[in-house]
């Protein structure tokens, strides 16, 4: 293997390691920060965004707050946040252990991370 490929693989895996840590931190802190009884509940935030866009989840609402939580069940937001962070944790651990970093897995990690970050709001 040529040195540039080795460097590419090392940098790729260190980035995946960072996402592993990010999802682990999200799993431990989401409920306290953006959960049902958190400091800035994401359910309330998404309801306000939906109300701002006249009660519809359309392209404008999706571009304002891009998250897959729009399409999931909001009745148990803590469980939904845990599910997203655990799915991201498992996916990044799989990529880190196997070294299989294809476009589908990396896109999934990006969508999951983007979904959690965009409901975090600005303090």
Image (spheres, rainbow, N blue to C red):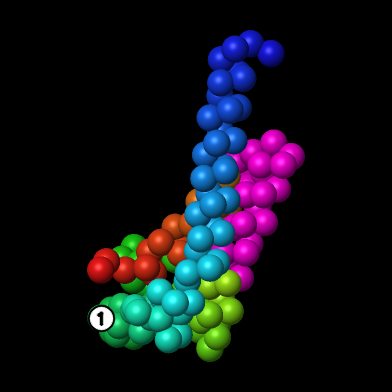
Q: In which quarter of the image is the N terminus?
A: top right
In the image, residue 7 sits, relative to residue 83, either above or below, namely above
The C terminus appears in which quarter of the rendering? bottom left
Residue 77 point in image, percent of width and height: 51, 81
Residue closest to the eye, 52 or 82: 82
Find disc 1 in the rendering and name its residue: 52
- The region drawn magenta spans 83-105
Q: Residue at x 58, y 79 (%)?
A: 79
Q: Is residue 75 above or below residue 1?
A: below
Point out residue 116 in the picture as x, y percentages from the top left corner.
46, 64
- Which quadrant holds residue 120? bottom left
Across and down, in percent, residue 106 comes to 57, 45
User: Percent position (x, y) of residue 110?
Assistant: 50, 51
Q: Which structural element holds mark 1?
A: helix
In the foreground, 22 or 9 = 22
Residue at x-position 58% and y-position 72%: 82
Tell me what residue is drawn at x 67 percent, y 56 percent: 90
Residue 84 among magenta residues: yes
Q: Is residue 39 left or right of residue 18?
A: left
């Amino acid at each position: 293997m040529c040195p540039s490929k080795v460097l590419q693989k090392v940098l790729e895996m260190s980035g995946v390691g960072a996402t592993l840590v990010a999802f682990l931190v999200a799993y431990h802190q989401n409920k306290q920060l953006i959960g049902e009884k958190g400091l800035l509940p994401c359910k309330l935030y998404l309801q306000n965004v939906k109300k701002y866009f006249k009660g519809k989840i359309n392209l404008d609402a999706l571009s304002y707050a891009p998250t897959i939580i729009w399409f999931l069940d909001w009745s148990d937001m803590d469980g939904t946040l845990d599910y997203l962070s655990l799915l991201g944790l498992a996916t990044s651990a799989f990529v880190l252990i196997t070294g299989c970093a294809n476009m589908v897995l990396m896109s999934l990690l990006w969508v999951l991370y983007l979904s959690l970050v965009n409901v975090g709001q600005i303090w």
